[in-house]
Amino acid sequence: MQTLTPTARVILGVLGLGPRTGYDIKKLTEYSTRFFWSASYGQLYPELHRLEAAGLVVSAEPAGARRRRVYELTDAGRDALHEWLTSDSLMTFDYRDEGLLKLFFADQLDPEAALAHVRRMRTQMENILAHFRMIADELARDREEDPARFPYLALDYGLAFMEWVVGWWAALERELQASDGRLVG
Amino acid sequence: MQTLTPTARVILGVLGLGPRTGYDIKKLTEYSTRFFWSASYGQLYPELHRLEAAGLVVSAEPAGARRRRVYELTDAGRDALHEWLTSDSLMTFDYRDEGLLKLFFADQLDPEAALAHVRRMRTQMENILAHFRMIADELARDREEDPARFPYLALDYGLAFMEWVVGWWAALERELQASDGRLVG
DNA sequence: GGGCCCATGTAAGTCGTTACATGATTTT
DNA sequence: AAAATCATGTAACGACTTACATGGGCCC
């Protein structure tokens, strides 16, 4: 059995929750896994076709006015999903942060410009955090009727992570401000 | 002036520190920015050619036995670098974490399998952290003669980040262990 | 009737990694 | 003499995003 492509992993995971259209999958990931695992239409639809050809999912076109194709897992698909979830091979862990790259080179800037960069970065991270909190608040409302547990843990990770990030940049900002102050005053 | 490609950003940043060969740039990033901004030969060499054609860098082939091409910034290149470092457009911030994706779907596993996943993830993150500490220790030795300041801040970020990550997974592991214990005992 | 959401798909372009090919020099 | 390191490059492949094309249904 060959390894699932990156996009196949989200697809199977989502279909494990129940039958969905490609559109449904996109919307769900947009709202939940997007921060740590996104999927775009350009990947999603072709991958659904490949998965069906490989026998891991089947689709049905329910009667109804609107053209739509609902996918669900086959037994083989469920096996592949379980195999992926429990396999202990190395898991993808990618991090790319342009703000950190600029910081790395900030010796090439004068102190005010470096401080300005740190401030910009702190602001940008605060915006992402604010967006996160909005989503968290929206989800908190449905939580009582939702039997799922782990999605909230993933959300907690995102929230706590962004809080940590904002804290790190804010602390650096204070530090640089203090040393700038000493130079000027 | 058009935006620099992702790889061009590291290249100009590194060349801002002084003349380097493509090989030098690779090695330096391998040891430092790799965690948050990597560069492979397949991107590096072609991009160096493009940057030279665009007039942002110039190369020289120094006399010597070994075939090598040393690049350095032109004035235009230095301008482009400064422009990038001080621009306030949105900075790339990508995060992809397969362990978190699996956690998101962990309601589909039985409690022991979910706990096993969390344990695996904690272990994997601990290994990355250990690798980080090794690099940090090596760098700490040269630090006294090194006038640079900001690269060490970026390293600190990486270290502190990985510590936070390990802490998060370890805490979750304890939590799940406790609730498993209640079910079993 | 207009605007929004549902819904599927493709094409083009960008970005990136891996593996390979090649060969010189230095170190052990 | 062998192994490691210096050094440059390309080809093939994989993954992803964006923009576009198309059209139906729902709600105000």
Image (cartoon, coloured by chain):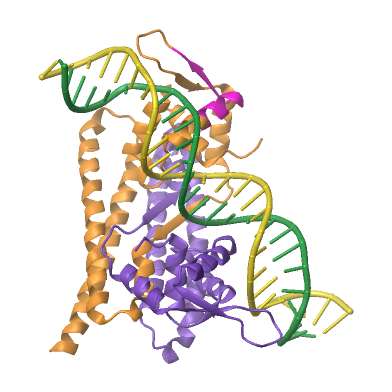
Chain colours: A orange, B purple, C green, D yellow
| In the displayed structure image, the side of residue B113 where residue A146 appears, left or right | left
Vertical order, B84 against B172 (above or below): below
Say if residue A172 shows up in the picture.
yes
Residue B150: give x, y in percent of width and height. 36, 78
Residue A161: give x, y in percent of width and height. 32, 55
Does the segment drawn in magenta span residue A138?
no
Q: Quadrant of the C terminus of chain B?
A: top left
How many labels sit on residues?
A: 0
Residue C25: give x, y in percent of width and height. 73, 85
- Residue beneath the point at 42% across and 66% down: B9
Vertical order, B29 against D28 (above or below): below
Q: Is residue C6 or residue A171 the one in the foreground?
A: C6
- Residue beneath the point at 20% across and 74% down: A174
Residue that extends furthest to the top in the rendered view of this protein: A63
- Residue beneath the point at 28% across and 66% down: B87
| In the displayed structure image, the side of residue A4 where residue B142 appears, left or right | left
Q: Is residue B57 or residue A73 the one in the foreground?
A: B57
- Residue beneath the point at 36% across and 71% down: B80
- Quadrant assignment, res A144: top left
Question: Which segment did they paint magenta?
Answer: A47-61
Q: Quadrant of the N terminus of chain B?
A: bottom left
Vertical order, A66 against B49 (above or below): above
Say if residue B110 shows up in the picture.
no
Q: Is residue C21 or residue B137 the one in the foreground?
A: C21
Residue C11: give x, y in percent of width and height. 50, 35
